[in-house]
Amino acid sequence: MDPVGAAAAQDLAISTAAERLAHLVQPVAEAEDVALRHAQGRVLARDIVSPIDVPPHDNSAMDGYAFDGLQLAAGQALRLRVIGTVLAGRVWSGEIGVGECVKIMTGAPMPQGLDTVVPFELAALQGDTHIVVAPGAVRRGDNRRRRGEDLKAGHSALRQGQALGPAALGLIASLGLPSAPVWRRVRVAYFSTGDEILNPGDPPREGAVYDSNGFSLMGLLTRLGVDVIDLGVVRDTPAQLEAALRAAAQQADAIVTSGGVSMGDADHTKATMAQLGEVAFWRIAMRPGRPMAVGHIRRAGHGAPALLFGLPGNPVAAMVTFLVFVRPALQRLMGAVVTDPVCLRATSSERLRKKPGRTEYQRGIVTRAADGALSARTTGPQGSGVLRSMVEANGLIVLPHEQGDVAVGDTVEVMMFDGAI
Ligand code: AMP
Ligand code: MG
């Protein structure tokens, strides 16, 4: 198949655009301490060093009987007298001699000198006072959790840049810390542009369409964990655009707009953006989402300008360019480690037409067969206005720059939505 035409040969490759974008972004550098219960989605501003050993003592991993494992001999049963019980939260202070054991509950500290636990189900009761451990039922050290096995005092528990999710929150709490040092929240203003754009709830009008981008962007931004400022729909006039961009820059660290950046548009969108800051207009070798504006909007009285992402208006193009460019850039702005989306390799169950010379993102559905094999198909028509395709897909089939047509049975890579959509 022919590569894309000569005009398109000038378009920026995705990797080049991503690299240039990364250089434009400086992380916010203001830290604050936030109570753990409000810290989900926030980003660590410092490493967290463990002040304690976790767990703080050797303890039992099972409900069972604890004893000194030195008494285990190969091929022989071990008979032990039960001399007491240790519950979680209690410390056993008595002596435990040879031939003796204690009943112990999960999490209870191991009594001094004991190192092995036989679970109830592997111990045979003998009368009211004794148990018998069958040969080979346990080895010395079994079912004991060691002090500091999760984390050692003085060691780094979590790194700066870690976004705090359920596991990280639990881990910080396990160290006894009630709050965490995090970067301040990033504020992102967004608006849609177009004379033809109506708000949902408005009566329909000939030639007009309802604003979908504003809502998709709100969802994408909120999932990312930024504070959002909704500036609604802005008409295609220089005065309105200028007012909206100025207002956005005053309130936000970054601005995301949709529409008005393609070749066919009235020049004033680009002219207005360029007049208010340093803005580059990129044509990117990708589909959907070829045109994009990227740069800064200056703001009065502030040091740093606001980042600007002018996304294309077509609803699928706006979402795909957000995922490919805006998401990693905002993670960087938030001070977070940039995480690559989960990519799976799957067998294409369809023939896909593709021109070399641009990266294509087709809306894909990955399914798993009974034997565990993954296969991918598209959602059907791939027009950049077909928003239904984003709803039905569970990922984007990424057809790389040099790739040509895909045959049935070829392996394709799928960037999974994984909670981002
Ligand atoms: P533009 O990039 O402004 O030329 O818009 C490209 C296409 O996307 C046009 O068909 C627009 O009507 C449509 N479009 C632009 N903005 C939105 C929006 N916020 N919601 C839905 N469709 C939009
Ligand atoms: Mg428009």
Image: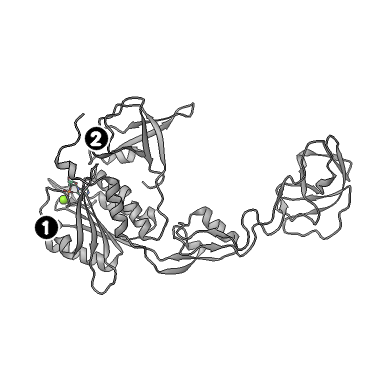
User: Where does residue 132 sit, x and y in percent of width and height?
Assistant: 85, 40
For residue 379, say whether it is visible: yes
State the residue at coordinates (28%, 49%): 16
Residue 34 percent location from the top left of the image: 48, 67
Q: Which residue is drawn at the image coordinates 26% and 69% (left, top)? A: 250
**Of the residues shown, which amino acid type is indicated by label 1?**
His
Position in image of residue 128 (x %, y %): 88, 44
Task: Report if residue 216 is visible in the image.
Answer: no
64 w.r.t. 331: above or below = above
Return the residue nearer the eye: 189 or 304: 304
Report the side of 29 relative to 55 (left or right). Answer: left
Q: Is residue 52 left or right of residue 339?
A: right
- What residue does disc 2 label? 356
- The answer to which of marks 2 and 1 sits earlier in the sequence is 1
Amino acid type at mark 2? Pro
Residue 299: which numbered mark, if any? none
Disc 2 residue crowd, few under 14, some 14–19, many 20+, Cα 10 Å: some
The mark lying in front, picked from 2 and 1, is 2
Answer left or right for 181 relative to 384: right
Q: Residue at x 78, y 54 (%)?
A: 86
Q: Is residue 371 above or below residue 203?
A: above
- 153 shown above or below 370: below
State the residue in front, 90 or 110: 110
Tell which of 164 and 223 is nearer to you: 164
The way the protein has been coloured in the rendering is one colour
Distance from label 2 to label 1 (Cα)? Answer: 33 Å
Question: Dividing the image into 4 quarters, which one contains the N terminus?
Answer: top left
User: What residue did someone put label 1 on?
Assistant: 268
